[in-house]
Image (tube, helix red, strand yellow):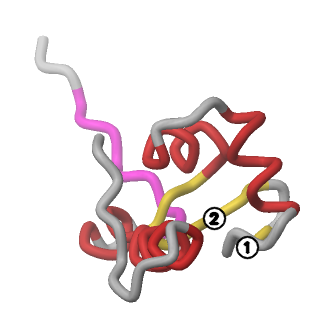
Amino acid sequence: MKKKQKPAKKGRPAPNQKVQHERLKGWTEIASFLGQPVAVAQRWARSGMPVTREGRFMYASREELSGYLGREAGLDVPVVAEQ
C-alpha cells in the first residue's frame, strides 16, 4: 500500500539565502564569526558593537561587524574575521 504524502506545512516562507548568510542570529553565531567566546561578544556589544535585539534573539550583520573590528583596530578598512 502506498503512503500518502503529507501536505506542505503552511507557515512562514523560507528566508532568502543571501540575507541569511549576511546576517548572524544568536550569540553563538556572532561569537563564532568574531572568533571569540560568547561572553566576549556580549561584552563587546555592551561597549558599542553593532547588534540588534529582535524578540529573544540577537542579530548582527557580517558587514557591520567587520567595519566595527576595523574601527576598533584603528584601521580605515573593514577587517575580515577568520572563520
Residue sitting at the far top? 1
* Quadrant in the rendering for residue 78: bottom left
Instruction: State left or right for residue 68 relative to residue 46.
Output: left
Q: Nearer the viewer, residue 48 or 21?
A: 48
Residue at the spot x=29%, y=41% of the render?
Answer: 83
Q: Nearer the viewer, residue 53 or 81?
A: 81
Magenta span has 3? no
Residue at the spot x=56%, y=35% of the render?
Answer: 36
Q: Is disc 2 in contact with disc 1, using a CB cutoff of under 8 Å?
A: yes
Residue at the spot x=82%, y=49% of the render?
Answer: 43
Q: CA distance from mark 2 to mark 1?
A: 5 Å
Residue identifier under label 1 = 52
Which amino acid type corresponds to the residue marked 2 in the rendered image? Answer: Tyr
Q: Secondary structure at mark 1?
A: strand
Task: Find residue 80 and report its horizontal and vertical position in percent.
Answer: 30, 62
Which amino acid type corresponds to the residue marked 1 in the rendered image? Answer: Thr
Residue sitting at the far bottom? 76
* Quadrant in the rendering for residue 20: bottom left
Q: Which mark is residue 59?
A: 2
CA neighbours of label 2 inside 10 A, class few (<14), some (14 to 19), many (20+): some
Task: Find residue 50 and report its horizontal and vertical position in percent.
Answer: 67, 75
Magenta stretch, main secondary structure, is loop
Instruction: State left or right for residue 5 relative to residue 33.
Output: left
Q: Taking the image as drawn, is residue 47 in sight?
A: yes
Residue sitting at the far left? 2
Image height of 21 relative to 36, above or below: below
> Which stretch appears magenta?
4-13
Residue at the spot x=55%, y=50% of the render?
Answer: 30
Q: Taking the image as drawn, is residue 13 in sight?
A: no
Task: Find residue 40 and report its horizontal and vertical position in percent.
Answer: 72, 40
